[in-house]
Image (cartoon, coloured by chain):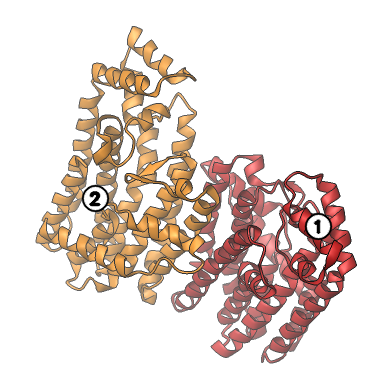
Chain colours: A orange, B red
């Protein structure tokens, strides 16, 4: 994973050189803040690595790679407003540190900034990658919409859930990879294999995120544990627990979902104990492995630099196995 | 103005053919709603007319023209959330008809949709117009930021105010014109003259909007009269009234600004009466004429179809003189 680490450093260094905090500060300072509080820079690293599969010179991919990262952070900013999340990466969210109007408007400016970085591509590449970026960005919004709708529904199926996380999380990883491949000179078939790799590891990654939201620890997860449980988020864990539990356990789970007044700690503890009783921990781990292996099948078919392929495989495994 | 009317019809017809209301409906229906409740389609009409100054075939400008209109409606959607406006074009605003989260997310999707329409340009034009669109979109956000900041400040100067409305309103009209001119084949100098025309009529247009917000009537203005007065918006009217009033009148005006508890109707009536007493009505009208004439000076230098130039001049005059 030496090259991935180098690319991560390259992304951090280039981000640090960007002057996000311009005038008016009330608009741009929150952008500087959220871009500066970290994250693993997964999307730009995937973009650069995918470019390097096909081309030793990755300089043309650097600015668009940042565009993918800025877009991702824009979605976090607006999602945190919509979910009323208080903490992100162990720091107060923008709408808490400033206010909701600031979070809305700075988020809008960030989305436009993302396009400014994509727009740095030369003409023929821009015409190929801008539609991919547009389509992906809309799909991410669709994913967030489904996510919010699912909170109010009790009949979400596993298929619907997987489709939601494909849209909300996986397509952006996939587009970062495909975009990087196209910039590196890959043909459509090769670029599409990287897209498939991204979709599969993206779904695996989100399943892991759901798992950690219930079973991780606050410090390393970077936000409060149990948020999904408190919000009755129809995650892979909850949907399966509802389907697989029966009798008293099933009724207890439904009671917790329906209760309006409860002690937060007690709800988290009880629902986690039901998850363990029903065995959904094992189930989600198997599902993660399934998507990882599907991703690997796509990656193996790529005709790119073998060393970078191995690095990408290792990075994907780390993403899915992460104990943050 | 026959050609302008034809272009307006062309825009309406093309908009009606767009399928904004896709699945998930919760995301896309508000886009269909706000795009459907009217407006004068000023930006796409300016874009098409500017294209036609230089080219009989305006077909290539049609989709980007819609992009400018969709972007404009996106800003209305998010601005209405930030200003907590209840009514837009005599209809409930999106965050009232649906909810705030819907307004945020559908607005995001609209901004991306705007880019989808811009992205339909062929490669060389896209590379020229996308940076213009990006820069303009950021400036519009900056204008909204200044607008919100000015509400909390008591020392806003006329120059700061004019710069704010240049950013918030004028640059988008200017970019629609410049973009249309470039699509029509204009060189940079010619396109820039249209940009200057747009800046000046845009500032005049916003001054008119401020005037109507206090002195128009609800039915034709499409939203409640006196909103600016109630929000202590530092408009051209209020800034001048603060500077030009003295003694008892000045103190009365400051009292109205500082009062937390008041009868809305009484505040609007009293502040309007101060505006009339101080003579800021006359002042704002002279300022509108100044910007209209500056705009005309730029338009006159354009080497384009003379008939379209006359139509554009007439359209600009109507915009600034509008009694909606």
Tell me what residue is drawn at x 44 percent, y 24 percent: A155
Residue under numbered circle 1:
B221
Q: Secondary structure at mark 2?
A: helix
Residue under numbered circle 2:
A197
In what quadrant of the picture does the N terminus of chain B appear?
bottom right
Disc 1 to disc 2, C-alpha distance: 53 Å
Residue A265, horizontal then vertical, whole percent: 35, 23
* Chain of the residue displaying label 1: B
Farthest residue to the top: give it: A248
* Chain of the residue displaying label 2: A
Q: Toward the viewer: B108 or B4?
A: B108
Looking at the image, can residue B228 be seen? yes
Question: Which quarter of the picture shows residue B190?
Answer: bottom right
Q: Toward the viewer: A304 or A205?
A: A205
Q: Residues within 10 Å of mark 1 (few under 14, many from 20)?
A: some
* Residue A147 image label: none
In what quadrant of the picture does the C terminus of chain B appear?
bottom right
Tell me what residue is drawn at x 75 percent, y 73 percent: B4
Residue A228, horizontal then vertical, whole percent: 37, 31
Q: For the residues carrying marks 1 and 2, which lies nearer the camera in this image?
A: 1
Looking at the image, can residue A303 be seen? no
Residue A228, compared with residue B261, is above or below; it is: above
Residue A196, compared with residue A221, is above or below; it is: below
Q: Is residue B172 left or right of residue B90?
A: left
């Amino acid at each position: 994973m030496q090259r991935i680490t180098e690319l991560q450093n390259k992304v951090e260094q280039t981000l640090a050189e960007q002057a996000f905090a311009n005038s008016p500060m009330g608009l741009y300072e929150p952008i500087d803040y959220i871009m500066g509080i970290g994250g693993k820079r997964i999307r730009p690293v995937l973009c650069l690595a995918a470019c390097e599969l096909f081309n030793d010179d990755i300089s043309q991919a650097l600015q668009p790679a940042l565009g993918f990262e800025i877009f991702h952070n824009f979605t976090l900013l607006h999602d945190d407003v919509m979910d009323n999340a208080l903490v992100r990466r162990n720091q107060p969210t923008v709408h808490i540190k400033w206010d909701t109007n600031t979070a809305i408007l700075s988020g809008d400016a960030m989305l436009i900034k993302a396009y400014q970085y994509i727009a740095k591509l030369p003409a023929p590449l821009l015409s190929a990658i801008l539609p991919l970026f547009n389509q992906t960005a809309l799909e991410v919004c669709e994913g967030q919409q489904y996510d919010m709708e699912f909170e109010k529904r009790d009949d979400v199926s596993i298929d619907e859930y997987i489709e939601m996380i494909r849209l909300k999380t996986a397509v952006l990883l996939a587009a970062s990879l495909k975009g990087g491949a196209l910039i590196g000179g890959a043909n459509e078939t090769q670029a599409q294999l990287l897209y498939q790799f991204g979709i599969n590891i993206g779904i695996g990654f989100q399943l892991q995120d759901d798992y950690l939201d219930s079973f991780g620890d606050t410090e390393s997860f970077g936000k409060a544990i149990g948020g999904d449980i408190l919000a009755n988020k129809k995650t892979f864990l909850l949907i399966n627990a509802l389907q697989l539990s029966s009798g008293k356990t099933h009724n207890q789970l439904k009671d917790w979902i329906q209760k309006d007044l409860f002690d937060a700690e007690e709800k988290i503890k009880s629902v986690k104990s039901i998850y363990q009783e029903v065995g959904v921990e094992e189930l989600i781990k198997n599902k993660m492995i399934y998507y990882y292996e599907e991703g690997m099948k796509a990656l193996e078919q790529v005709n790119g630099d073998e060393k970078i392929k191995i690095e990408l495989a290792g990075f994907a495994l780390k993403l899915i196995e992460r104990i943050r």
